[in-house]
Image (spheres, grey):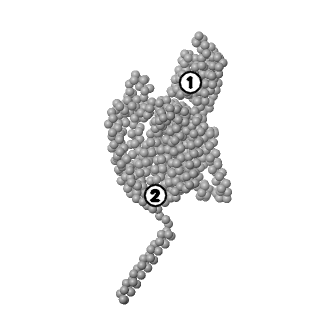
Amino acid sequence: MSRLMSRLTSTRMTNYRRTRSQSAMGTRRRNSPASPAVHAPRRNFVLPVTTLYALVCLALALVSTSTYAELFAHPSRMALIGGAIPQATVRGAEFFRAALLLASVAMPLLMWMLTRVTASIVVAPERAPSPTRNATIALAGAVLVGAILRLSIASQSLWYDEISSFLSFAVYGPFVAFGSYAVPTNHVPQTIATWLAWTFTGSTSEWTIRAPALIAGIAAIPVAFALARTLLDTRAAIIGAWVMALAPIAVIESAEARGYALVILFSMVATLALARTRRELSTRACDASVHYAVFAVACALAAWSHPVALLLPIAAGIIGLTRCRVDAHARALTLASLAAGVLALVLLAPLLSDVLTTSSDYTLSSATQPTVFSREGYEALIGLTLSWSVWWQVPSPLLLLTALLGGFMITLEPRGDTQRARAALAPLALAFVLALALALCCNTWIYARFLLFALPMSVVAVTYALHRLLDRALDPWFISGFISGFMHRQFNGARIALIALMTGSALASIWFYREKQPIRAAVEFVAAQRTMLHASAAAERDDVATIGLPDNVVGFYTQQLGFRATATGFLGSTLAQVITEQHPHFIIVLYPQRLDARVRATLESNSHHIADFAGWADWGHGAVEVWQANAASKNDASDDAR
């Protein structure tokens, strides 16, 4: 009996201790901060995808050089040499096959090394609130407003470079666009996408030709949302999306059928990938090699969209090499940069021969070409405020101050989020400096839009500044407490005023740059004049000539209206001959400021100026003029006709 009682007592004491222990553990769990549920890491698809890519490259490398040369050959260039394939195209095909062989070996090796290096830096998931319904609505609103702004500008006339790219490359199909770079208006992925849009719709409207750029520009808005959320929080993500939606440069370049919208999008994706190597907001741990691989692909696509963006992986590689001995992230960045270089080499290899053949065209040959110290260099710096200069070549003051404030915060503050931002933006900053330095040292011309790969740096800087302004956290950044005190006392009103001023400033810049080169308006004016002549029977001839650059872009619009425009060579070099032989009744002049004295004299002696259409292309040199033949010239034409 005593043994039974002792067993029961022992069992009760054991159960009592177990209950107290479980209760204490539950209390500690309730009182301790919630920890994220760490799931098993995602499966890493970097090596399988890379292996598949290498096999595809190896298979493509087995195709003969002559086959590629026939696909890449430009019909216009072949016609000039009796139907033969240009030697530069053959060399481009050889370079392409060599690049494919290199990629089939180098890419698996680089990705294997990358996965080994990043094995020790798995990015642990961080518990972050999912975007709320309001945040999702705000993002949708930013996308909608950004799309409306871009579509409104995209309805304007195409300008020279857009039409030249379409007429010189897109109409000949994707293979010619992929393998020919006779003139630098060919931004390959944009040209191929334009060909697709034209093929599927059968339309040559402005919206059709600009559709790829519009899609890329709109897609950059949610990428900016994700980037700001990775660096800061959901409130910053909303601000970042609206900054990208309203940024004047982003809007203008998204409404232009050139490769710059794609450059901005891919550089945004590359920056987001770098940011996520330091902070992962998903519910699962992710191998950092995935993010570095995305960075490599995005950099290669940006360089394919415009070759100057190749400086981005070069700058990232330089940064990685300076710290590769002490930092696994730096070693991974170096390998990812090398992978980006290999991928870009495959995409750009067919164009290398054309670039080398025409390399002298990229060096400065006259004082009128843009340099670092010209208006283009100035605008490249002003572009860091997300807008080109406006009235009197002055940057938008509010955008300038906001960008500078955000830049100072990111550079000087030792917080964790600013450290992540510095790591993600450092390659952009170095690439921007390298672009200016190389243009200066290599004595080559440069345009401000060549440096738009650095736009994510400005988006993040403005987002940081606005995030702090709207969060009442600017006390350390004011020398006087007056402004800070006013912000605290009248915070809601000041916040609304700040948002209104920033929006108004951005919209004013967009309005200032609404019309780049109104070729369509000039052609429509001439068409109306021709209709009036036909109605009054005032002239027996109504031929039209055009002065411009090598491609007859005026003819793109005149053909749509049922008449043709005769080209007069580069900037009117054969104007006198065309006037003598055809006696054109109207002459449409592009880039009138660039005409030399001889052409100007011929134009003025045979015709008179009747209309002028202003445009901002080349910073105020985008005007289109319309001239009409003098009475004496018309009489001579009538005599010749009789």
Q: Is residue 325 left or right of residue 450?
A: left
Residue tagged by mark 1? 562
Residue at the outermost left position: 62
Q: In which quarter of the image is residue 1?
A: bottom left
- Picture mark count: 2
Residue at 55% across, 38% down: 255
Residue 62 shows in this picture: yes
Query: Could you classify mark 1 by the number of other residues whose Cα lies within 10 Å: few (under 14), some (14-19), or many (20 or more)?
Result: few
Residue at 47% across, 44% down: 266
Please provide percent x and percent y for residue 204: 53, 32
Please provide percent x and percent y for residue 329: 42, 53
Q: What residue type is labelled 2?
A: Thr
**Residue closest to the eye, 70 or 588:** 70
Q: In which quarter of the image is residue 156?
A: top right
Q: In this view, does 358 lie to the left or right of 488?
A: left
Residue tagged by mark 2? 283
Q: Is mark 1 on a helix, strand or loop?
A: loop
Q: Quadrant of residue 325?
A: bottom left
Mark 2 or mark 1: whose residue is earlier in sequence: 2
Q: Quadrant of the C terminus?
A: top right
Q: What residue type is labelled 1?
A: Gly
